[in-house]
Image: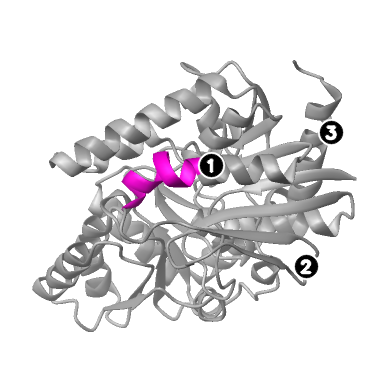
Amino acid sequence: MIRVVMAGDYPLDPRRIRGGIEAVTYQLAKGLAQTGEVELHVVTRRKDVTRYRQETTGDGYTMHFLPSPRRLSNLLSGPTVDRLNLRRTFRSLAPDLIHAHGQEWYAYAALETGLPTVVTVHGILHRETELLGHSLAGRVRGLLYNYSEESVLRRARHVILISPYVAEMIRPWSHAQTYAIDNPVDERFFALDGTAEGNGNVLFVGNLSPRKGLPNLLAAFVAVTSARPDALLTIAGRARDGAFLAGLKAKAHALGLDRGVDFAGHVSEEHLLELYRTCTLLVLPSLEETSPVAVAQALAAGKPVVATRVGGVPYMLRDGKTGFLVAQGDTEALALSIVRLLKDDDLRRAMGQEAKLEARQRFSLANVAHKTLAAYRSMLAGRGE
């Protein structure tokens, strides 16, 4: 039995998951516990927890919720109070190894303990911070995140790669032993019937931020509704910046899309499953991505995907086989690809069937959990040192 601490963003309520990393840690924790070969402790920090809380889950692992000061932004609490609390908690749990998600303060604190640590790289912060804007706050945030990422990657001896794109991007800083393991997908997505008729429902799932390219999607959807008047774009995701969301809604109104776009907000997991079940396709017009969970979920549900050819997305989609890849910012190509899938029932169904088969091989929870367990054993056996 291996005693493992998994550290990363984790949902306070698994029925309402905020973003891809929370989805990954929640699913992977369940999968590892199901192997019966890991004594698992999951450590997460949250602004909505006022005191330390420990609880045993029904899935067979122990949760440790650490409070993060509400009055301090993550930018301030992460490298100070949170980092110290994380480091103290890791040492008190005395694990055989720590599995940290992301290149920020979970990984930074884990490496400070001197305990065996493996880091899963989620997102390339050096690329993502380029999209934070040129305000003073954006520049400071970018400098701090970039410092954390570079420090973590230079010190980490073991890294899990969720995409070949990660291997390409971390090469300047990292000489770690690497393990190629995809993100897992909730088994409930595989159970969905992917053969929905071409009902005109187009789905976007993700946090609402400039990185996701939503203004380009709205511009493209004008052409989509011209070709298919009954088309409906559902935008499901949390907006951290109210002004950005207001700007998107204003743009949709200015483009005459009041009836063609539904801003669904942050939805429950049950609602999300229903959105995937009833959509015709998923669209992801991002400016930067690593291995987006939304794409893996769509493929598991048997839905074709139209996405921009950025970052790690081309490693997830086979252009013309499980979806369409378009150039970033090419709104005409984005619209044409969406319309083609809405109108061509045979093509859409063939792509959906191929997508589900590929997703089962790559993203099933059991497969990902066993690969992760094998990586742990390799680390502890001292191979690759």
Q: Is residue 185 left or right of residue 292?
A: right
Work out which residue is located at the far left of the displayed protein and give it: 254
Residue type indicated by callout 3: Arg
Quadrant of the image occupied by residue 64: bottom right
Query: The N terminus is located in which quarter?
Result: top right
Q: How many marks?
A: 3
Query: The C terminus is located in which quarter?
Result: top right
How far apart, in angstroms, are the residues tagged by discs 2 and 1? 23 Å
Mark 1 and mark 3 lie on one chain; the one further toward the N terminus is 1
Q: Is residue 385 left or right of residue 246?
A: right
Residue 315 to residue 55: above or below: above
Quadrant of the image occupied by residue 366: bottom right
Q: Which range of residues does the magenta coloring cover? A: 73-84
Residue that mark 2 sits on: 59
Residue that mark 3 sits on: 377
Mark 2 and mark 3 lie on one chain; the one further toward the N terminus is 2
Residue drawn where x is 45% and y is 76% of the image: 267
Whether residue 322 is visible, yes or no, is yes
How far apart, in angstroms, are the residues tagged by discs 1 and 3? 21 Å
Tell me the SS state at disc 2.
loop
Residue 72 marker: none
Tell me the SS state at disc 3.
helix
Residue that mark 1 sits on: 106
The local crowd at label 2, few if under 14, some if 14 to 19, many if 20 or more residues have their Cα within 10 Å, is few
Mark 2 and mark 1 lie on one chain; the one further toward the N terminus is 2
Residue type indicated by callout 2: Asp
